[in-house]
Image (cartoon, rainbow, N blue to C red):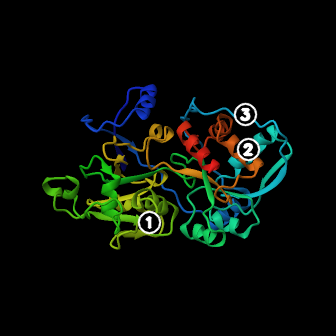
């Protein structure tokens, strides 16, 4: 049987994990890595044309939820509705994988402010992005990924500023098609135990925004013996793609300096074959959403910042938002810098970014609720 091998640091209890996540990172942790073996997932296949059309009409059907579910962060703020009367009709759009969650938010918010009407209508599609906001026909767009750079550029060209993009929930853990967390992995024979964002940038980018020298051999990552002089075979997803864009923004780009890919990467047009490619290449490394790991590979814990602890893409780490390649869903709207958001939309966002709003995410059971620190960051963005 093909198996996925994951290296991770074992923590004894859930409460210990919470404490560890809140504590400062230790730079001298010498504990050895622990590996466990889990079966590879069943292979997913692309949607058929009819399935895609049905998703645009009615929203995409999501797979069954994970057996284990996270708990709400007890530090999430409670929603305290404004006392003044709010009214208005607001039209929006949504990705096909967010339709049900968004409509549940609408339904609950209506209890607090019955004279505010929020609606989304077909087609439901992740490609809507800021394009619909540029047209001026919609007040908001829920998108299950980061906006495309071209979308933002078009919006900025018309209005002179970027759209307001607010994270409103975590992504899923490994739900196919539903913003699963991303993992880097190598062939199961590879002795590598961890990798940093700086090293990944040095391997995958031509721009090296993080300042490192190019990495071309496994010995550049500290591997010895037969591995020292073996070339690194890079696998990646051909631009433009939501997975590729996330990795590019998260790892290859720094500030407003956008990273660019190396030209000698073995690009795949779609994400589906990535794990099989790495599984069959002793010197390969690649990445994909966790839902697409359908072959025997070794998933590598990542270190975001110098001195930080390696984070494996376990369900626990993704739920606690300590795994740095977990994803987010976004509420996008047109808000000029320094100008207040419409009071009703501001109230709606405050509701989503509250204990009550994230409880709906938990009950929906496909996506992961935000942690309190993430909510704080999102609320700060609304106020700008």
Q: Nearer the viewer, residue 83 or 236?
A: 83
The CA span between labels 3 and 1 is 40 Å
Name the residue: 35% across, 37% down: 25
User: Which residue is denoted by mark 3 in the rendering?
Assistant: 80
First reached walking from the N terminus: tag 2 or tag 1: 1
User: Which residue is denoted by mark 1 in the rendering?
Assistant: 258
**Along the horizontal axis of the image, is 279 left or right of 269?**
left
Give the image location of residue 96, x and y in percent.
66, 57
The CA span between labels 3 and 2 is 10 Å
Q: Residue furthest front?
A: 338
Give the image location of residue 250, x and y in percent.
44, 56
Q: Name the secondary structure under disc 2.
A: helix
Give the image location of residue 173, x and y in percent.
51, 45
User: Which residue is denoted by mark 2 in the rendering?
Assistant: 347
Residue 91 occupies quadrant? bottom right
**Along the horizontal axis of the image, is 105 left or right of 23?**
right
**Along the horizontal axis of the image, is 64 left or right of 315?**
right
Q: Is residue 1 visible?
A: no
């Amino acid at each position: 049987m093909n198996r996925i091998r994951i290296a991770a640091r074992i923590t004894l209890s859930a409460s210990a994990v919470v404490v560890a996540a809140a504590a400062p990172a230790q730079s001298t942790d010498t504990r050895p890595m622990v590996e466990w073996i889990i079966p590879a997932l069943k292979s997913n296949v692309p949607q058929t044309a009819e399935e895609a059309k049905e998703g645009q009409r009615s929203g995409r059907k999501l797979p069954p939820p994970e057996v284990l579910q996270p708990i709400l962060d007890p530090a999430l703020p409670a929603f305290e509705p404004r006392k003044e009367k709010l009214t208005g009709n607001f039209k929006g759009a949504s990705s096909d994988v967010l339709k049900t969650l968004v409509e549940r938010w609408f339904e609950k918010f209506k209890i607090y402010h019955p004279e505010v009407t929020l609606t989304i209508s077909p087609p439901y599609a992740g490609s809507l992005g800021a394009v619909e906001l540029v047209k001026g026909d919609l007040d908001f767009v829920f998108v299950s990924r980061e906006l495309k750079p071209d979308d933002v550029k078009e919006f900025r060209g018309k209005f002179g500023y970027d759209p307001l993009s607010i994270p409103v929930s975590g992504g899923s853990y490994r739900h196919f098609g539903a913003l699963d967390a991303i993992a880097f992995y190598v062939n199961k024979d590879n002795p590598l135990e961890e990798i940093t964002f700086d090293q990944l940038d040095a391997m995958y980018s031509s721009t090296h925004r993080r300042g490192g020298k190019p990495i071309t051999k496994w010995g550049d990552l500290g591997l010895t013996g037969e591995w020292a002089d073996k070339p690194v075979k890079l696998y990646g997803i051909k631009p433009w793609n939501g997975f590729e864009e996330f990795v590019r923004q998260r790892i290859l780009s720094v500030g407003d300096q956008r990273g660019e890919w190396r030209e000698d990467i073995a690009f795949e047009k779609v994400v589906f074959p990535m794990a099989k490619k790495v599984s069959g290449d002793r010197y390969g490394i690649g990445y994909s959403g966790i839902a697409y790991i359908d072959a025997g590979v070794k998933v590598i814990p990542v270190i975001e910042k110098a001195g930080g602890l390696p984070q494996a893409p376990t369900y626990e780490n993704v739920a606690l938002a300590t795994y740095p390649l977990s994803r987010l869903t976004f509420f996008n709207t047109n808000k000029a810098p320094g100008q207040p958001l419409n009071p009703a939309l501001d109230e709606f966002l405050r509701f989503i970014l509250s204990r009550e709003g994230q409880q709906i995410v938990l009950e929906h059971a496909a996506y992961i609720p935000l942690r309190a620190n993430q909510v704080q960051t999102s609320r700060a963005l609304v106020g700008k």
